[in-house]
Image (spheres, rainbow, N blue to C red):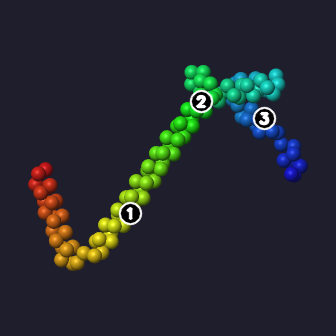
Amino acid sequence: MSGTEADAPPPAATVAAVAAPGSAASASRSSGGSAGLAALLADVPGPAGGEQLGDAIARLKVEQDAVRANRKRVTKELKNAQKRKQRVKNRAKQLSDTDLVSVLQLRASEKAVVAANE
């Protein structure tokens, strides 16, 4: 560790120095370390409605599980869509020229029907 790192203030002091002038954190800096920590913790958004920490942890774990399940579902859907696209490309490679021409004619006729209905 260099000399400048050893002389640096602890991270909590850096956070207190960043607090807005006149806030509880800057006023408590002069009274002692525990009051400054309490003021900093009061600014951190906590559980709503006086929820106990154990309840908050359980709620957050359930939320985390839901997010993981959603991420897993989206990943599965993405893989399926990519596989589907690859299958369509492989089938398209096997089409003959006459097949491709007939597909283009079908598309053109469908577009004409849609345009006529509008």
Write the residue at 44% across / 49% down.
73
The answer to whether 64 appears left or right of 6 in the picture is left
Coordinates of residue 34 in the picture (x, y in percent): 79, 26
Q: Residues within 10 Å of mark 2 (few under 14, many from 20)?
A: some
Position in image of residue 54 (x %, y %): 63, 29
Q: Residues within 10 Å of mark 1 (few under 14, many from 20)?
A: few
Q: Is residue 14 above or below residue 6?
A: above
Mark 1 or mark 3, earlier in chain: 3
In the orientation shown, which residue stands out farthest toward the right?
Answer: 3
User: Of circles 1 and 3, which is in front?
Assistant: 1
**x 64%, y 28%: residue:** 53
Q: For residue 26, say whether it is visible.
A: no
Amino acid type at mark 1 = Lys
Count of picture labels: 3
Residue 56 marker: 2
Is residue 113 depicted above or below 93 in this figure? above
Residues 1 and 14: in front is 1
Residue neighbourhood size for the residue with mark 3, other residues' Cα within 10 Å, grouped as few (<14), some (14–19), many (≥20) = some
Relative image position of residue 118 (x, y in whole percent)? 13, 50
State which tag comes first along the sequence, 1 or 2. 2
CA gap, disc 1 to disc 2?
A: 41 Å
- Give how far across and how far down residue 3 sits, in percent: 89, 49
Out of 77 and 38, give the one closest to the viewer.
77
- On the image, which quarter does residue 96 sit in? bottom left
- Looking at the rendered structure, which numbered label has been put on residue 113? none
Q: Residue at x 39, y 58 (%)?
A: 80
Residue most toward the bottom?
A: 97
Q: Quadrant of residue 23?
A: top right
- Looking at the rendered structure, which numbered label has been put on residue 13? 3
Q: Which residue is mark 1?
A: 83
Alpha-carbon distance for marks 2 and 3? 28 Å
Q: Secondary structure at mark 2?
A: helix
